[in-house]
Amino acid sequence: FGAGSSSSSSSTQAPPPLPNSMHLVTPKDLDGISSVFWARNGQMLVATSWDARALVYSRDNLHQEPHTIKLGDHPILSACEMKGDHWALASGCDHKARRWDLQTMDSDKIEVVASHEAPIKGIKSLDANTFVTGSWDKNVCIWDLRMSKKPAGKHTLRDKVYSLDGIGGMIVVGVAEKKGLTFDMRKFFEGPIHSSTSLKFQLRQVKCMPDKTGYLASSIAGRVRVEYLDESKEKSFSFKCHRVANDVYSVNAMSFHPLGTFATGGGDGSISFWDKEAKQRLKQFPRQHSSISALEFTPDGSGIAYAVSYDYSMGKCAKDRKRANEIYCMPVNERDVNPRRTRVAPRRSRR
């Protein structure tokens, strides 16, 4: 990737929050933030944490305290909205996946909807009734809420699941073997339709491309792989990012913008916007006081939510309890996310 426009600083001193960012109210004792996502067509922002809490904000009142609900007693590793409804899903270290009501936030309505024999690292809704889970027990399971609490489909892999994403009938699973495995829902029992081993170090996250032509895979070693399923049309490639001098950081989070560009957030505390078609960085923001552990664009692309939080990459002992785990929302300038091939040149003033 080319350098593109950049506003980052090489200074190690923590800068102020990113321009025009709104600092959301969070509990003072909130543990590390594991996910953020928008729900109800962008009208709600949901965040989950390592202390099993889910925070729900109204987009119209982001400055107010969130509704909080406790989802068990173990860290939440993954969460998402249940498509076509007012429910959300979360999974974590207690080997269970839970569903809760975003409207009422009633703890009495929390329901265990799936279970594995090890922590569930990834969960993704496929439609209003079905969702997929991936676990450290090496199983990927399809669940149907209209059926019993046994998997409607199950595929056993060779290694642990580290990340999972899905869109339409496409499911991508990132595993400990540093592989990305792509499944077609219609042929789930036949196994992966595509497999790629392109990362040299541990895989951190996978994210499906909105047009379903491929996916992104990030690693703990400051690298992102752009993987296309049909190499005859597009060539896959990798690029380096989230590196400061000789230090290399994990790429913790990725999110696609409606225009097709995407954002990455890393252990270096920075956020960058990228154009995969032009192979260029569009924007880099100043580093924050801690890792970017999660981020997601709003459905309309007008803003982005991000978490500045310890990502546990150095273990529990390295956690700085004096630094708060924080959530921000920032408006997105369309010029910063427009694909390079369509970017509009600034107007020159007439003399």
Image (cartoon, rainbow, N blue to C red):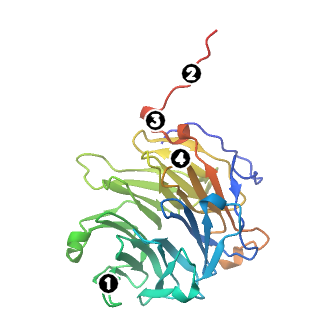
Determine the image quadrant of residue 266.
Answer: bottom right
Q: Is residue 175 visible?
A: no
Q: Percent position (x, y) of residue 140?
A: 34, 79
Pick whichever of labels 1 and 4 is earlier in the sequence.
1
Residue at the disc numbered 3: 340
Q: Is residue 63 left or right of residue 38?
A: right
Dot 1 and dot 4 residues touching (CB under 8 Å)? no
Instruction: Look at label 4 and name its amino acid.
Output: Phe
Q: Percent position (x, y) of residue 75?
A: 58, 81
Distance from disc 1 to disc 2, alpha carbons, whole Å, reads 57 Å
Q: Is label 3 in a helix, a strand or a loop?
A: helix
Residue at the disc numbered 2: 347
Tally the marks: 4
Distance from disc 1 to disc 3, alpha carbons, whole Å, reads 45 Å
Residue at the disc numbered 1: 146
Residue at the disc numbered 4: 273
Which residue sits at x=76%, y=68%? Answer: 323
Instruction: Look at label 2 and name its amino acid.
Output: Arg
Q: Percent position (x, y) of residue 24?
A: 70, 62
Pick whichever of labels 2 and 4 is earlier in the sequence.
4
Distance from disc 2 to disc 3, alpha carbons, whole Å, reads 17 Å
Distance from disc 3 to disc 4, alpha carbons, whole Å, reads 11 Å
Pick whichever of labels 2 and 3 is earlier in the sequence.
3
Which residue sits at x=72%, y=53%? Answer: 17
Q: Which-is-in-front pick, marks 1 and 3?
A: 1
Along the line of sight, which residue is nearer the eye, 249 or 148? 148
